[in-house]
Image (tube, grey):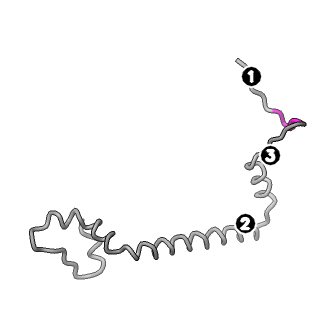
Amino acid sequence: MAELTHHSEPAENSDKPAQPGAIAEEQFDAQSLTDHLRELRSCLVISLIAVAAGFAGSYGFIKPIGTWFFKPLTSVLPQGSSLIFTSYQEGFFFI
């Protein structure tokens, strides 16, 4: 069985690029606190935009989603009856 060794120096004729993890780690260590905060802010803004886009996209399909969600309840109701909610939040507390 061949023994695997790790060489700290890259081969001279190596056509492989440096490992992305090592480069990212060097950049991470070199960043100042304000750079980290800027990166965090940009990630949070992108996440907020993605969540808002998800809400906006799902709002267009609210009727089909609601029908699918309440299908198990409406299938066991007697013929000609329907679900009745007296306040907005009661639709979520049907269990």
Q: Amino acid at mark 1?
A: Glu
Residue 50 placement (x, y as % from top left): 54, 70
Q: Main secondary structure of the magenta part?
A: loop
Q: Which residue is mark 1?
A: 3
Distance CA(mark 1)–CA(mark 2): 41 Å
Q: Quadrant of residue 2?
A: top right
Q: Nearer the viewer, residue 47 or 87?
A: 47
Mark nearer the N terminus (1 vs 2): 1
Q: Are marks 3 and 1 in contact (CB under 8 Å)?
A: no
Earlier sequence position, callout 3 versus callout 2 = 3
User: Mark 2 highlights which residue?
Assistant: 36
Residue drawn 29% across the image and 80% down it: 88
Residue at the limit of the structure toward the left, as seen here: 79
Q: CA distance from mark 3 to mark 2?
A: 23 Å
Residue 10 point in image, percent of width and height: 86, 38
Q: In the structure shown, which secondary structural element does the residue marked by tag 2 occupy? A: helix
Q: Rate crowding at label 3 as few (under 14), some (14 to 19) or many (20 or more) other CA atoms within 10 Å.
A: few
Q: Which mark is nearer the camera, 1 or 2?
A: 1
- Between marks 3 and 1, how big is the CA–CA gap? 23 Å
Quarter occupied by residue 64: bottom left
Q: Characterize the local packing of mark 1: few (<14), some (14-19) or many (20 or more) Cα atoms within 10 angstroms.
A: few
Q: Would you name the residue on which mark 3 appears?
A: 18
- For this view, does 84 lie left or right of residue 18? left
Q: Quadrant of the C terminus?
A: bottom left
